[in-house]
Amino acid sequence: MDLKETRLDSKAVYEGDFIKVFKDNVQLPDGSVGMREHIAHPGAVAVLAILDNGDLLMERQFRYAPQRDFLELPAGKIEYGEDILLTAQRELLEETGYIASSWTHLTTAWPGIGFSNERMEYYVARGLTYQGQQLDEGEFLEVFELSLSDALDWIRQGKINDSKTMVGIFWLEKMLNDWK
């Protein structure tokens, strides 16, 4: 059964600095016409940065839309046309001040498939060396260390409830068990 929907026309209803919102008319698999609203997003990376002592580098950051602080993995958006590994390296240095000698792509996840084409690329970074934080203008966050077991406990307790961070930590736990 072919489930593909075919775009008939598209109208940009909002164009921001990095997201665009579209309203499309589509032909549905049964031949009828439907409407789809969606956000075009360049994608993002999340970094599971593991210190030599085994702890993760984490961040506490205020997020405007939900109006609260979140405990998160270092992460950031991919600039249009930018290599995703370079994005991960750039974001780790900017936000935490660390560079890594070893990078492993962990997985790709799609956080909002019902309304966005955003993808989240996950990397594990090891062999960390502190170089000095280089936050973007207007970016404010606190960096801290957290063991994987505490991170898992904090997810269970609801202290960590950012979905990209939860996905990354669960994948890391699985992969570390597989890597043993």
Image (cartoon, rainbow, N blue to C red):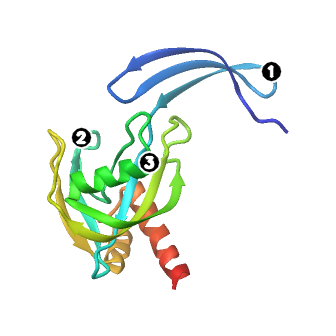
Residue 32 locus on image (x, y percent): 76, 19
Q: Residues within 10 Å of mark 3 (few under 14, many from 20)?
A: many
Residue assigned mark 2:
64
Which residue is at the front of the view, 171 or 135? Answer: 135
Answer whether labels 1 and 3 touch (C-beta < 8 Å). no
Please identify, in this view, whether the residue under mark 2 or under mark 3 is nearer the observer: 3
Helix, strand or loop status at disc 2: loop
Q: Residue 143 appears at what percent x and percent y?
A: 19, 62
Give the vertical position of 74 relative to 156 (above or below). Answer: above
Crowd rating for badge 1 (residues with CA inside 10 Å; few <14, some 14–19, many 20+): few
Instruction: Specify few, some or many for label 2: CA neighbours under 10 Å numbering under 14, 14-19, or 20 or more.
Output: few
- Nearer the observer, 36 or 9: 9
Identify which residue is drawn at 23% across, 44% down: 67
Q: In this image, 44 relative to 91: left or right?
A: right
Mark-to-mark CA distance, 2 and 3: 25 Å
Q: Badge 3 is on which residue? A: 84
Residues at circles 2 and 3 in contact by the CB criterion of under 8 Å: no
The earlier-in-sequence mark between 1 and 3 is 1
Distance in Å between CA atoms under marks 1 and 2? 41 Å
Picture residue at 44% right of the left edge, 41% below the top: 43
Instruction: From the image, tell me which residue sits under label 1.
Output: 31
x and y percentages locating residue 87 in the rendered image: 37, 48
